[in-house]
Image (tube, helix red, strand yellow):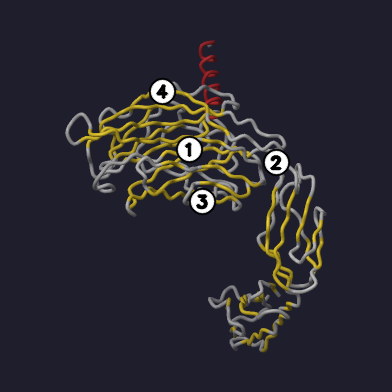
Amino acid sequence: MKKFLVFISLIFIFSDVFPAHITGGEMIYQYLGPGSTANTKSYRITLKLFRDETGGGAAMPGVVRIGIFNNDNNGHISLSPFDISLTSVSQVGVTPPPICMSNPPTLLYTMGTYVFVIDLPNNANGYTATYQTCCRINSLENVLTQGPPAQGEGSTYLCRIPGSSQLPAGNNSSPQFRTVLSPVCYRGNFTFDFGAVDPDGDSLVYSFCNAFNRGASVNASNVTPTAPPYQSVTYINGYSGSNPLGSGAILNTQTGMISGIAPQNAGNYVVCVCINEYRNGVLIGQHRKDFILPVDDCAIPTSTLNPVYTSCDGFTVNFQNLAPPDNIQSYYWEFGDGNTSTLAAPIHTYAVAGDYVLKLVVNRGLACTDSATAIVKVYPGFFPDFTFAGQCQNIPVQFNDISTANYGIINKWKWNFGDVASPNNTSTLQNPTHIYNTTGTYNISFVVESDKGCIDTV
């Protein structure tokens, strides 16, 4: 009985600790030259696993199991899978946080590498090398996690080696992502480098993509990988593979730099970036890196504005910084008409209609300063309205736009006749007609827009 209890305890300990430390991975391949036998090529395959040293849990795996699949038939090659021992462990570089960051996070990550060399016969569709594990850290803000063991989503890290169909001539080594970390504060401006270097000088195009889930096994180690294709993890809370950090974050498709406004909640976010690799304008492969990005409860002085402010009902506009007030000691507003303010949330009245450039500088003249600009469009005197004639069933009802604008012209209309059963329930004409086939009361919605940016609904 004692032996049985000890065995069960070890299972739960292992299941709890393994998902808590691996925070991402990348697998690369390097062409080394012709293989040792005819019609083969030699490759060095490297799996990189990233570990959060502050999160506790098990050490970097001493051995990983990597499967290699022949894409011509989707089967394991001879002797696959391969058990590969840990080759080296190195510390991941970290960009120091700004001196004015409040509550700076401790970023302490290591990268374990698992390296082996293999000769692969030439074929048409190439090969896929795959490593899989049951779990991801718990919890995640954008991907399903329900606690161990393996009740949430797992991980698949892979590389695809092109065959003659993708690369009729020449040879190729995969791109390699850079491995530098930067602190990211929730709700704040940030940059995070997902750029890569290509040893062959090929053109690289970056995109967000779905992270892959585990295969058939729910074990944490010694998993024999399943053959491709692989399924996406389950995204939650409105996030997706193409939108892993919310609408405020963008990926530069040419550099791999992620920037913008961080998510509104602190936590861990799965981010997967894919690289399409082009040679002479022809796609020859795709590479990927899957990493769990920590977004921390920290802050730096940030100036954030809406891109455009539009006032169509008066000359007075309210402004405020959209970023958190942490460590902001002063505000300096320029309203674009020669007037300024040092209030945190000023109310400004413009003298004449027009377009203005708004600028906000926080901590002006201090060590930690930031600025943002926006366009202010002031065009009061915009009055949407309409009339209609006719209230009989099966007879056209005439709708007429009688909206007025003191500035610019009204150039867009969108009607919703409230007749959900009708295939012609909407119109973008200025003065449309609509036939109601059923008696009743209908709620009409009318959206009007001008060339000055004014928009309103009646």
Q: Position of residue 164 (x, y in %)?
A: 24, 45
Q: CA distance from mark 2 to mark 3?
A: 24 Å
Query: In the image shown, does 454 or 239 lie closer to the viewer?
Result: 454
Task: Give the x, y percent position of residue 14.
Answer: 52, 22
Label 2 crowd (10 A; few <14 / some 14-19 / many >=20): many
Mark 3 or 4: the one toward you: 3
| Residue, disc 2 | 299
Q: Relative to the observer, which residue lies in front, 378 or 244? A: 378
Tag 4 residue: 87
Q: Secondary structure at mark 3?
A: loop
Measuring from the top left, give residue 240's x and y in whole percent. Answer: 53, 49
The answer to whether 82 is drawn above or below residue 231 in the figure is: above
Q: In this rendering, which labeled residue sits more in front, label 4 or label 1?
A: 1
- Residue 370 position, x and y percent, is 69, 48
First of labels 4, 2 by sequence position: 4
Along the line of sight, the residue nearer the viewer: 170 or 124:
170
357 above or below 19? below
For badge 3, the amino acid type reads Asn
- Marks 1/3: CA–CA distance: 15 Å
Could you give the CA–CA distance between mark 4 and mark 2, rounded to whole angstroms? 38 Å
Residue at x 30% of width, y 29% of height: 80
Q: In the structure shown, which secondary structural element does the residue marked by tag 1 occupy?
A: loop
- The reply to whether the C-beta atoms of the residues labelled 4 and 1 are less than 8 Å apart is no
Picture residue at 51% right of the left edge, 51% below the top? 252
Q: Nearer the viewer, residue 200 or 283?
A: 200
Q: Is residue 231 left or right of residue 58?
A: left
Q: Residue furthest front?
A: 365
Q: Which residue is mark 3?
A: 252
Q: Earlier in the sequence, mark 2 or mark 3?
A: 3
Q: Which residue is mark 1?
A: 178
